[in-house]
Image (cartoon, helix red, strand yellow):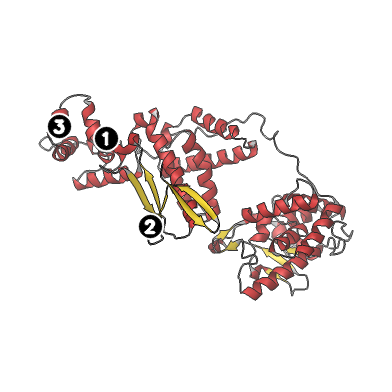
Amino acid sequence: MPKNQFERGILSITVKYLWRAPSGLFYYHRRVPEAVRKHYRPGQGFIRKSLKTRELPKAVKRATELAAEDDALWRSLRTLTGERLGATTREDREGAIALLRQHGLSPGDALREHAHYEPTPIEVLNDAFEQAHGETFAEARYRDDDPTINRLLSGAEREAVRLIKQDPETPRALLSEALEEYLKNHKNAGRRKFERDTRRSLSHVLNAVGDFPLSAYRRQNANLVRDNMLATGMKSGTVRRNLNTIRAVFNDGVREFDLRDARNPFEQVKLAGEGEDANNRIIYSDDALRAIAEACQARDDDIRWVVAMVADTGARNSEIVGLRVEDVFLEEPVPHVWLREHLKLGRTLKNPQSVRKLPLVGTALWGAKRAMRSAQKSGAQWLFPRYSADNDIRSNSASGTIVKWLRRVTKTQGDTHALRHKMRDRLRHVDAPMDVQDEIGGWGTRTVGQGYGEVIGLSSFRVGSRKQLGRPERQFSL
């Protein structure tokens, strides 16, 4: 197991599967296990891939991802199911198709009719294998079920034999291929977070069961994936979200590869006691909210500006972190932010109801002014450039830092979502109509009628003040 030690400042880091060339470029370097070596080029004992970076953190992250992919693949190749189905690598598949083309063949040719005077597709391949492997193959090809043949043929050659016998009407599509098709054609294609989250969900299947044709998965596989997730301590809500993603990828693969007879075993997977393990949400007291406001202004940095804006707008943490400078309007009669998508830049929102304009009051106005001043001084286009860049919005990173700080300040287990719950209470306290409450928080289903005219939240809502955060003024006007 290759391990290399790297110096970073005063730290010494030991990393598996990472090698640095004299040029400083990092490579993923790993030995191919003997059991799966037949799927690689003859004599290939190691994998070496350039990570195209000289930065250690990026190299470690990418090497870890490649190692996880190889682990899942090799696990699939070693299983009894993998052996029965003839599981192979993507390189083998590509090599097999190239081999068939080289000899004028196509997948499914063995099932088509040919003139009696022409060699059959199987004979064409056998002649090619005989030239490649000599007399040993020539002797074994005429003996039924001779294991010598499997030992001689490479993974690409075995895959070529399988492809030529495959019914073109029922092609074999692997789960990994369905995943790539899903990521390529989804409306959020190209969004890093979407791709990362989707791959993470599918990794639970690849690690627990393996990467097999969609038609090979059974209900017991789906139940095993569910049980493995629960065994890690994952909450039932998180398990359900992962299962929903797996189900969507599977269904998309069935449609895109036209697998008419395939059934999705991940449909309606049962979860005993679903939702019962959810933690009761903390809702901050007025005193806690005042403490947060005071601590934000005392610390006065970008993290605290985010917290201030979340606290007095009721927006989601990701909605604030992903703001661009052009989304902030401080010189308008009612200072506000416009929560909207910038799809080409990777800025998305949770749902259509999330597009809205929110007034800036109390510490939210203070935080927005401080953030705008900082962004304009540095020339940034994103309001919080430490966590946002084109096609790279890291709201989860900001959230982790914020939650730790909030829990120190409030001495509770609250988080940024608790601020949204508090905003709902504050809106109730000023007798705000339900449609206004929903508009402010981006909650619920927005009707066609609600889309007409000015956004309700911008012109009719005033809550709290810089001095009285946590004690909403009971004023509301239409």
Report helix, strand or loop for mark 3: helix
Q: Where is residue 93 shown, x and y percent of the image?
A: 31, 43
Q: CA distance from mark 3 to mark 1?
A: 24 Å
Q: Amino acid at mark 2?
A: Ala
- Relative placement, left or right, of 45 versus 53 is left
Q: Counting other residues with Cα less than 10 Å from the Cα at mark 3, is it few (<14), some (14-19), or many (20 or more)?
A: few
Q: Residue at x 45, y 52 (%)?
A: 184
Q: Name the mark on residue 165.
A: 1
Q: Quadrant of the N terminus?
A: top left
Residue ranking furthest to the front = 10
Q: Identify the residue shown where x is 35% and y is 35%.
A: 87
Q: Amino acid at mark 1?
A: Lys
Farthest residue, direction top: 144
Answer yes or no: is residue 169 visible.
no
What residue did someone put label 2 on? 21
> Residue 23: horizontal and vertical position, in percent?
38, 62
Report how far apart the C-alphas of labels 3 and 2 lie in the structure.
42 Å
Q: Earlier in the sequence, mark 3 or mark 1?
A: 3
Which comes sooner in the sequence, label 2 or label 1? 2
Residue at 21%, 25% (x, y): give it. Answer: 146
The alpha-carbon separation of the residues under discs 2 and 1 comes to 44 Å
Say which element carries label 2.
Answer: loop
Image quadrant where residue 436 sits: bottom right
Position above or below: 432 against 212: below
Crowding at label 1, few (<14), some or many (≥20) Cα neighbours within 10 Å?
Answer: some
Q: From the image, tell me which residue sits under label 3.
A: 136
